Image: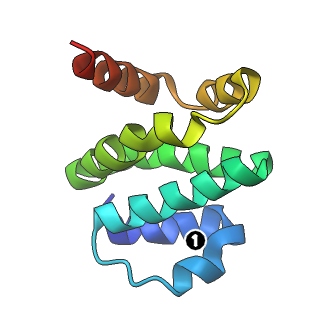
């Protein structure tokens, strides 16, 4: 799946963010993943778990089914910023967010975190 297909899938799966997505000119994989990541940041701050969980599920699907560019965008944008977005959360809320991320993305997260701490 390329970024255009990913954009279409996001539109269908998460109608709550469609209006904002329509206002955005998606130019590449990084742009759509940054858009979705920024939306999730807002949802975390607003404690909008229902929509956040839809977004996390869709991010997992995009990572599983996406082409190499989509996967790289998820690893370098979403995964990279995850700590920053959840840093101010209570431990229980943060744990709940991380529990909704697929095991595959959790491995990517762990690999990224541990590679930076060496």
Q: Above or below — where is 104 with respect to 10?
A: above
Q: Nearer the viewer, residue 63 or 38?
A: 38
Tell me the residue at 46%/82% (across/down).
Answer: 24
Q: Nearer the viewer, residue 2 or 54?
A: 54
Tell me the residue at 49%/71% (across/down).
Answer: 8
Residue 84 placed where, x, y %?
Answer: 48, 39
Q: Is residue 57 left or right of residue 77?
A: right
Q: Above or below — where is 92 with respect to 57?
A: above
Q: Is residue 74 left or right of residue 44?
A: left
Tell me the residue at 37%/78% (across/down).
Answer: 26
**Circle 1 residue:** 11
Q: Above or below — where is 104 with respect to 67?
A: above
Q: Nearer the viewer, residue 80 or 63?
A: 80
SS label for mark 1:
helix
Placement of the N terminus among the 4 image quadrants: bottom left
The image quarter in which residue 97 lies: top right
Placement of the C terminus among the 4 image quadrants: top left
Dot 1, how many residues are within 10 Å of its Cα: few (below 14), some (14-19), or many (20+)? some
Q: How many marks?
A: 1
The image quarter in which residue 69 lies: bottom left
Q: Is residue 5 left or right of residue 90?
A: left
Q: Is residue 64 visible?
A: no
Q: Is residue 27 left or right of residue 22?
A: left
Q: Residue furthest top?
A: 118
Residue 20 placed where, x, y %?
Answer: 59, 79
Tell me the residue at 38%/19% (across/down).
Answer: 110
Q: Is residue 46 visible?
A: yes
Residue 17 placed where, x, y %?
Answer: 65, 71
């Amino acid at each position: 799946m390329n970024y255009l297909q990913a954009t279409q899938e996001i539109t269908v799966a998460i109608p709550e963010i469609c209006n904002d997505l329509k206002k955005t000119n998606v130019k590449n994989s990084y742009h759509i993943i940054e858009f979705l990541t920024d939306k999730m940041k807002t949802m975390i701050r607003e404690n909008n778990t229902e929509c956040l969980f839809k977004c996390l599920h869709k991010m997992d699907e995009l990572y599983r089914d996406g082409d190499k560019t989509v996967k790289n965008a998820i690893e370098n944008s979403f995964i990279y910023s995850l700590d920053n977005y959840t840093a101010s959360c209570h431990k229980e809320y943060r744990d709940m967010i991380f529990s909704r991320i697929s095991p595959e993305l959790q491995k990517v997260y762990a690999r990224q975190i541990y590679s930076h701490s060496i």
